[in-house]
Amino acid sequence: MNVQWYPGHMTKAKRQMQEDIKLIDLIIELVDARVPLSSRNPDIDELGKNKSRLILLNKADLADERQNEAWKAFFQEKGFFVVKVDSRSGSGMKAIQNVIQEACKEKIERDRRRGIKNRPIRAMVAGIPNVGKSTFINTFAGKACTKTGNKPGVTKGKQWIRLNKGVELLDTPGILWPKFEDREVGIRLACVGSVKDDILNMEELSLNLIGFLREKYPGALKGRYGIEEEGSNVNLLEGIARARGCLKKGEELDYAKTAGILFEDFRSGRLGRITLEWV
Ligand code: G4P
């Protein structure tokens, strides 16, 4: 299975981000907590090499809490600041304000030495499509912010959202693409719904997911569908099809429909909190 994905936009988005990065102190990089490595862009470390770095494990509500903690430690060890967040509910937002100050301590100190007072920290949200950038910006900025217009010294057309406590956020997120050459990366991103379903073979993908779940989260499929987790992955898919009455005309099982149900259950958390990529 080969996963392909809007390649035409990639160069433009990257160039845009290169320009925007010149204006900021801090990169707030969103990754999907269920696939923290696969949802990272390999260029971002190079692009942001002189900037303070904060990684948000977004969609932490859908991921396994033990793995969330393990990934947090993993990235912290590499020198990143890390916060687990659920951008939809707003959980984790409070912690971010303090972590931003901590992450930009050197910049604040440098300003102080030069006699510059209250220059806001400028931050940009970055990440691959569908990781939750817009949701995060909306939730984090909330109502307690104002959009600032074009100001002298700011590139024309840039919109900044002024947050509390001396932080300004660029209102357009930096979009980057994951590493698609790696087949496993493509499969993981497809499972979490970050690749359009219509270009994928969902039935094949569902067998991948079933194989992973029965190994790492035994009981999850039984708990949801009441099926025994025995036999081949195809046997389990058949079991789910029967349990959910996915039949075509006659007695033939409808695997496409079954795969659709499985992925909807997985992506919405109804199979439990599941991390596909383990530390
Ligand atoms: P993007 O700007 O990076 O492309 O992502 P966007 O904010 O559009 O979010 C993509 C999807 O992920 C949205 O769902 C959004 O609600 C969901 N999402 C974002 N952050 C979180 C999170 O922390 N937890 C959970 N559970 N979901 C999150 P959607 O299905 O595309 O839209 P909708 O049904 O929510 O309207």
Image (tube, rainbow, N blue to C red):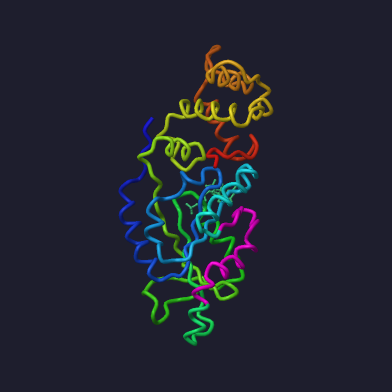
* Image coords of residue 13 (percent x, y): 35, 56
Front position in the image: 70 or 243: 70
Q: Is residue 24 above or below residue 189?
A: below
Q: Magenta residues?
A: 82-108
Q: Residue at x 44, y 41 (%)?
A: 195
Q: Residue at x 52, y 14 (%)?
A: 252
Front position in the image: 207 or 171: 207
Q: Is residue 173 above or below residue 241?
A: below
* Image coords of residue 234 (percent x, y): 52, 18
Front position in the image: 275 or 131: 275
Find out whether residue 251 is within the magenta segment: no
Q: Is residue 143 above or below residue 77?
A: below
Front position in the image: 86 or 26: 26
Q: Quadrant of the C terminus?
A: top right
Find out whether residue 87 is within the magenta segment: yes
* Image coords of residue 154 (percent x, y): 39, 77
* Image coords of residue 27 (percent x, y): 47, 63
